Image: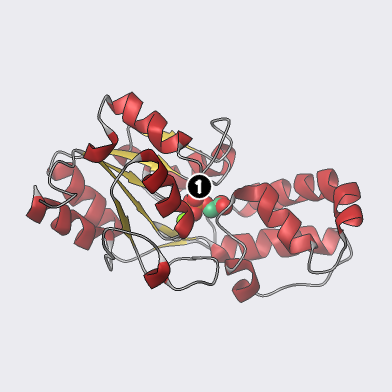
Amino acid sequence: MSVLADVRAAIIDLDGTMLDTIPDFHVAINGMRAELGLGPITQQQIALMVGKGSENLIRAVLALDWDADRIEAAFAPAMDAYQRHYLSINGNHSVLYPDVIAGLTAMQAQGLRLACVTNKPIAFTTPLLKQKGLDGFFEVVYGGDSLPRKKPDPLPLQTVCADFDLPPSQVVAIGDSSNDAQAARAAGCPVLTVPYGYNHGESIHDIDSDGIVNTLLEAASLIRSHN
Ligand SMILES: O=C(O)COP(=O)(O)O
Ligand SMILES: [Mg+2]
């Protein structure tokens, strides 16, 4: 029997799964770096660092130029600058991946309950989902700072399972990175991965997942075919 046979709900990741947000990260990070007297970096560099939340991203971006002591000394103002820049352009340069709306619509039509779990701060996530027409699909949304621990910790996924009153085996996680898969495995949720996002520069094929789907619409079809 397929691990997808009893699926009743899906937890969908945001950055790299629903939206290509690297162009937003790029503008905000380089705005922060300019304030700190640092030169611009490329989208390719940033794509390797996204996925483990804002604190991790800012430390990685500053580590390109500075040692640990200097990073600690400048961390609070750097984070303030980053958040200010990000919020001022949030969503302006980001685009939906193909078949995201169609996939979510199909999942909803199949009766799946939907949650969004992202490591993006909730203050960035809520307006972004609304701006891109994604907010109406999700019963619950957790950002990276909504709960005491973020992915790859299983807590956000376990919290959604509890919210939905479903066992983890009935809640599939869909994401673009090993972060999503590790959280899902630790929570006991089946997991599907998309190959087009940001997996810390690693191959999607190295992720322990229950299947690779090219789009969220393909994920919806795969789940339906096993239900
Ligand atoms: O902002 C991040 O670190 C990545 O967020 P994600 O969990 O939506 O991929
Ligand atoms: Mg992601």
Q: Is residue 184 left or right of residue 42?
A: left
Scheme of colours in the image: secondary structure
Q: Does the image show residue 199?
A: yes
Is 131 or 8 nearer to us in this picture? 8
Residue 130 point in image, percent of width and height? 43, 43
Callout 1 environment at 10 Å: few (<14), some (14 to 19), or many (20+)? many
Q: Amino acid at mark 1?
A: Pro
Residue 190 point in image, percent of width and height? 28, 48
Q: Which residue is mark 1?
A: 152
Task: Report the residue at 50% width, 47% height from top.
Answer: 152
Residue 59 point in image, percent of width and height? 75, 55
Task: Report the residue at 87% width, 64% height from top.
Answer: 66
Q: Does the image show residue 14?
A: no
Task: Report the residue at 55% width, 46% height from top.
Answer: 120
Image height of 20 relative to 125, above or below: below
The kind of secondary structure element at disc 1 is loop
Task: Report the residue at 56% width, 35% height from top.
Answer: 149
The verdict on label 1 being within 8 Å of ligand 1 is: no
Image height of 45 relative to 191, above or below: below
Q: Is residue 2 left or right of residue 49?
A: left
- Give the quadrant of residue 7: top left
Image height of 162 relative to 21, above or below: above
Q: How many marks?
A: 1
Q: Is residue 196 left or right of residue 65?
A: left
Residue 187 point in image, percent of width and height? 38, 39
Q: Is residue 79 left or right of residue 187?
A: right
